[in-house]
Image (cartoon, helix red, strand yellow):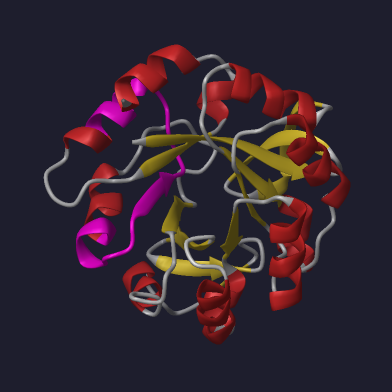
Amino acid sequence: MILYPAIDLKDGQCVRVLHGDLDTATVFNNSPADQAKTFADSGFHWIHVVDLNGAVSGRAVNADAVEAILASVSVPVQLGGGIRTLADIERWIEAGVSRVILGTVAVTQPEIVRAAAKAYPEQIAVSVDVRAGKVATQGWTESSDLDAVTVAKRFEDVGVAALIITDIDRDGTVMGFNVEAFGAIADAVSIPVIAAGGLATVDDIVRLRARKGVPIEGAVLGRALYNGAIIPAEALKVAA
C-alpha cells in the first residue's frame, strides 16, 4: 500500500482544514517546500498536494508553492485543486507533476477526464469527494446528485491511474477511516482506490490492508501525521 502525505495549500502555506472549510485552516508550515522535503526525507515515496484556494476558485492560486515543492523533492507528486482544462493539465505535467488529480470536471465535464487520460496514460487520477453519500464539487462548496460509484464508473477502461475517494464528513476530524465505505467502492470498480479523510492512527492502515475484497491501493495521511499521532516510520512499515 502506498502512503501519500498531504500538503494542502492555502495562501501559500501548508495547512489542514476541517471538512474542507478554508475558514478552519490551521497553519502547520509556512514553507510547503520544506514540508515536502521533510516528508521525502522521512521515506515517503509520493506526495499528495492540493491547492485549496484553487479548488474553490477554479484556477491555480498557489502555483508558486507547487513549483517550489516540485523543485525541492525528487519523489513523485500528485496535484489537485482548480485544474479544469486540458491546458491546465498539460502545464502541470510539463512542470514535473507526476499525476494530475481531476475532481470537479469529473462530474461536470467528464469528457475532459477521458481526453486527459488518453493523452497522459496513468498520469490522471479522479478525485471523488463524498459528503452524505453524494459527490461534492467546486472545492466541496457545491453538491451533485451523483454517488461515488456512478462517477467512478464513467472512467473505467480509459486509463485513469487511481480514484482518490475522500470522506468529507470525516476529513480533518481524525476520527478513523470508514473502511467499509472505501472498500465498497473498490469492490465496485476496476480502478485502484486511494482512501482519504479521517485517518487517525496506524490501526486505520492495518484495517484497510486487512479488509476482505479488492485491496485498497493507498491512503492519504493528513492531520494525524502533522499532529504526531502517526509516526512516518511506523506507518510505512505497516503499509509495506
Q: Quadrant of residue 205?
A: top left
Residue 202 among magenta residues: yes
Rendering quarter of residue 59: bottom right
Residue 209 drawn at (x, y percent): 23, 35
Where is residue 64 drawn, in percent x and y?
88, 46
Q: Is residue 174 above or below residue 133?
A: above
Image label count: 0
Residue at x 81%, y 35% (from the top left corner) = 13
Q: Residue furthest left?
A: 212
Across and down, in percent, residue 133 comes to 37, 64
Left or right of residue 87: residue 61: right
Position of residue 240 in the picture relative to residue 95 (left or right): left
- The relative height of residue 184 versus residue 17 in the rendered view (above or below) is below
- Location of the C terminus (image quadrant): top left
The answer to which of 220 and 24 lies nearer the viewer is: 220
Q: Position of 187 compared to 151: left or right?
A: left
Q: Visible in this render: residue 24? A: yes
Please name whichever residue, 234 or 14, is drawn nearer the observer in this view of the structure: 234
Q: Quadrant of residue 113?
A: bottom right
**Residue at left 67%, top 19%?**
38
Does residue 18 appear left or right of residue 44 in this picture?
Answer: right
Q: Is residue 180 magenta?
A: no
Q: Which residues are magenta?
A: 185-207
154 is higher (above) or lower (below) than 11 = below
Q: Is residue 85 visible?
A: no
Q: What residue is shown at x 46% (from left), y 50% (from top)?
A: 169
Above or below residue 200? Residue 118 is below
